Amino acid sequence: MNPIDLIVTVCAVLSPATCEETHLVFNWSGSLQQCVMAAPPYIAQWVGEHPKWNAVRWRCEYPHANDKADAGKATPAG
């Protein structure tokens, strides 16, 4: 398993133009694209713990590389 960064762009619920990136780091044994596809439950948990924020997009990166997989404008279910 390798550490991987799940980088989530979140916007304030009460001010949708106010957005920032948050980094969730965890161990992952799959590809970056698999990380992007498996991310929604992790994102939903984070949003559940931070109800003032809404996730609008996310991507996965290795902490030491420029290799990326991007979910674009996908939104999490739930």
Image: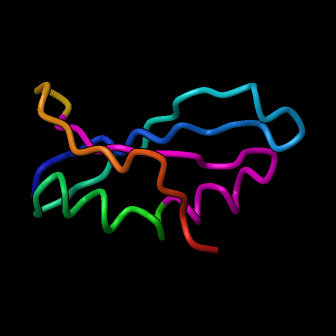
Where residue 8 appears, as percent x and y from the top left, is: 48, 42
Residue at 30% x, 41% y is 5
Between residues 11 and 5, which one lies in front from this camera angle? Answer: 11
Where residue 33 appears, as percent x and y from the top left, is: 19, 56
Q: Number of labelled discs?
A: 0
Between residues 41 and 56, which one lies in front from this camera angle? Answer: 56
Task: Provide the residue span drawn in magenta.
Answer: 43-62
Where residue 44 appears, as percent x and y from the top left, is: 58, 65
Question: Picture quarter containing residue 70?
Answer: top left
Q: Is residue 16 magenta?
A: no
Where residue 18 appears, as percent x and y from the top left, is: 74, 25
Vertical comparison of 21 with 46: above or below: above
Residue 17 as seen in the image, left or right of residue 76: right
Quadrant that contains the N terminus: bottom left
Residue reaching furthest front? 73
Q: Is residue 57 magenta?
A: yes
Vertical comparison of 20 with 28: above or below: above
Question: Picture quarter containing residue 20?
Answer: top right
Residue at 77% x, 37% y is 12
Residue 29 as seen in the image, left or right of residue 39: left
Residue at 36% x, 45% y is 6
Between residues 15 and 51, which one lies in front from this camera angle? Answer: 15
Quadrant that contains the C terminus: bottom right
